Amino acid sequence: MPDFAVNLSMLFTEVPLAERFSLAAEQGFQKVEIQFPYELPAPQIASLLQQNNQQLILLNAPAGNWQTGDRGIACQPDRIEEFRQGITQAISYAKELKCSNINILSGISPESYSLEIIENTFIDNLRFCAEAFAQADIQLLTEAINTQDIPGFFLSSSAQAFDLFRKVDHPNIQLQYDIYHMQIMEGNLINTLQNNLDKIGHIQFADVPGRHEPQTGELNFGNIFQAIDDMGYSGVTSLEYNPSTSTAESLRWIKLIAERE
Ligand SMILES: O=C(O)C(=O)[C@H](O)CO
Ligand SMILES: [Mg+2]
């Protein structure tokens, strides 16, 4: 089975963020990720990680104002200064929490700019982050998101991401490959992972449709996890789904899939 982490922004949401670490530890998770950790001071998160003997393996850079509809701002020409200020905060959290990956969300394409200007803005911001993160020994990740859930999201396929990586032309950039989003946008999951393993730094998953736990939808996670192991992927694979039941009950698939092996 892959090396699993759990996303504390989507699982264990029965309790506030600060209480999710211990619930995850009770279920055996020593690696956790948080989409936006900024609601808690970094020293508090550091002590929660220490108390529960856990490692934070991923956080997102600030992504604008989620409540008013932002889903990242890295492709937005009018918000470059705000984006880069957020990067300072993300690096500071990552350093204090010994977190070695930061995910950048492109955000939704603004209607008032051409696609060329939007893409160039995103490329410049990614290049800026790749260098700043490299100096702090942090891996830059960026994630493609499906445009059914977030219409207009700029980076929406792995093919687009790999084309952008050639244009960014920096060694410190990899894709956060989210199986849920990529099943909706591209399918062909196992081949894409296998053929692009050198460009994939992190994997997340949920079933389709519904974005719930494995065995609630159309994907064969037993086969997908076996393939991830067989292809020699050495990164982390994270549970990032909305449990269809309580989080604890939603984890039954792990045992069921492990028994099949
Ligand atoms: O929505 C997702 O799939 C993510 O991983 C992002 O972190 C969104 O916040
Ligand atoms: Mg994801």
Image (cartoon, rainbow, N blue to C red):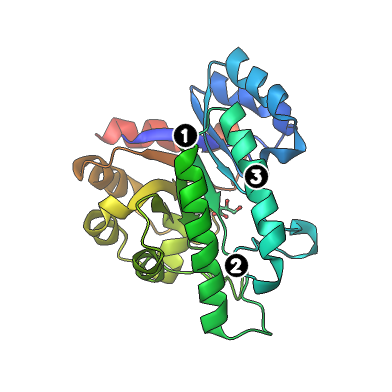
Crowd tier of the residue under label 2, counting other residues whose Cα lies within 10 Å: few below 14, some 14–19, many 20 or above: few
Measuring from the top left, give residue 42's x and y in whole percent: 69, 29
Which of the two labelled residues, at mark 2 and mark 1, occupies the earlier sequence position?
1
Q: Is residue 135 left or right of residue 93?
A: left
Determine whether label 2 and label 1 are within 8 Å by CB: no
Residue for point 72% across, 23% down: 44
Which three-letter amino acid code belongs to the residue tagged 3? Thr
- Give the residue at mark 3: 88
Q: Which mark is residue 149?
A: 2
Image position of 89 with respect to 209: above or below: above
Image position of 97 with respect to 110: above or below: above
Q: Calculate the distance from the C-alpha at mark 2 to the C-alpha at mark 1.
A: 23 Å
Residue for point 79% across, 58% down: 67
Secondary structure beneath disc 3? helix
Q: Nearer the viewer, residue 203 or 252?
A: 203
Measuring from the top left, give residue 219's x and y in whole percent: 38, 56
